[in-house]
Image: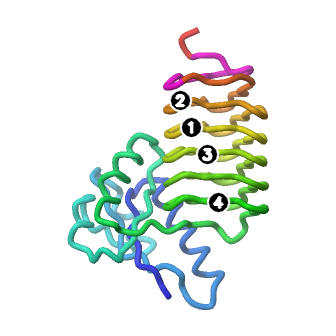
Amino acid sequence: MTQPVVVVGAGGMGRCVLDVIDAVNEAQPSPAYEVIGVVDDGDPDPDLLAARGVDLLGGVNALEDLPTEVGYLIGIANTAVKRRLDERLSVIGRPSPVLVHPNVHRGFDVRLGPGSVICSHVSMENHIRVGRHVHVNQNSTVGHDTVLGDHSTVSPLVAVSGNVVMKDEVFVGTGASIRQGVQLGRGSTVGMGAAVVRDVTVGSTVLGVPARPADA
């Protein structure tokens, strides 16, 4: 049965979500998803959407005019925005499917929360827990026994070691690496290319090798 969906966000992350949907549909005898369109409260480039035959339906409010069986996938990397949108859209019971690119390596007992998007060439080992609307971007790795909290974003080429606990709304920049056993506090940010070797406190930003607080 084909699930109708709307992608929330028409920027780069939103178009990455569309890429994963295309790959999933192409790998199956019949399409798993039907893209009704894209919604965005900003000013997206209409040519980029038109080139792939996807309609811009308007702002996020346009979802209110669609049947409740139409699902939503949030294509926005900003973690706080993801949380606000999810809180706004989930109250009417609209579904949020799990989206996994066909070439993802997924080990034993990997549990993915509603709306999670796992992009191409990601490797996820065993006994992993992933919350709501988490993005794991291209060519990243997630080690065993790791927890990725709700609305978090793992950028491309990130290496998350085993037994890492990432609380809700954490953003990890491109090419960062997280040492085994580290905990990342809620709302924290790991800068691009950083090497995190110790716990990161709630709401803080860490940068560099080894990673240190941005204001240090």
Whichever of callouts 3 and 4 sits on the residue coming sooner in the sequence is: 4
Residues at marks 2 and 3, CA–CA distance in whole angstroms: 13 Å
Residue range highlighted in magenta = 202-213
- The mark nearer the N terminus, 4 or 1, is 4
Mark linked to residue 148: 3
Q: State if disc 4 and disc 2 touch (CB < 8 Å).
A: no
The colour scheme used here is rainbow
Residue 54 appears at what percent x and percent y?
A: 39, 73
Quick one: label 2 or label 1, which is nearer the N terminus?
A: 1
Which numbered circle lies on residue 188? Answer: 2
> At 51% across and 40% down in the image, what residue appears?
168
Q: Amino acid at mark 4?
A: Arg
Residue mark closest to the camera, 2 vs 1: 1
Q: 82 or 137: nearer the eye?
A: 82
SS of the residue under disc 2? loop
Q: Which residue is mark 1?
A: 167
Dot 4 crowding, Cα within 10 Å, few <14, some 14–19, many 20+ = some
Callout 4: SS: strand
Does the residue at mark 4 contact the one at mark 1 (Cβ under 8 Å)? no
State the separation of the CA atoms marked 2 and 1. 8 Å
Residue 111: which numbered mark, if any? 4
- Counting other residues with Cα less than 10 Å from the Cα at mark 1, is it few (<14), some (14-19), or many (20 or more)? many
Relative to residue 67, is residue 115 depicted above or below?
Answer: above
Q: Amino acid at mark 1?
A: Lys
Q: Position of residue 108 (x, y in %)?
A: 78, 62
Taking depth in this image into account, of 170 and 46 the one nearest to the observer is: 170
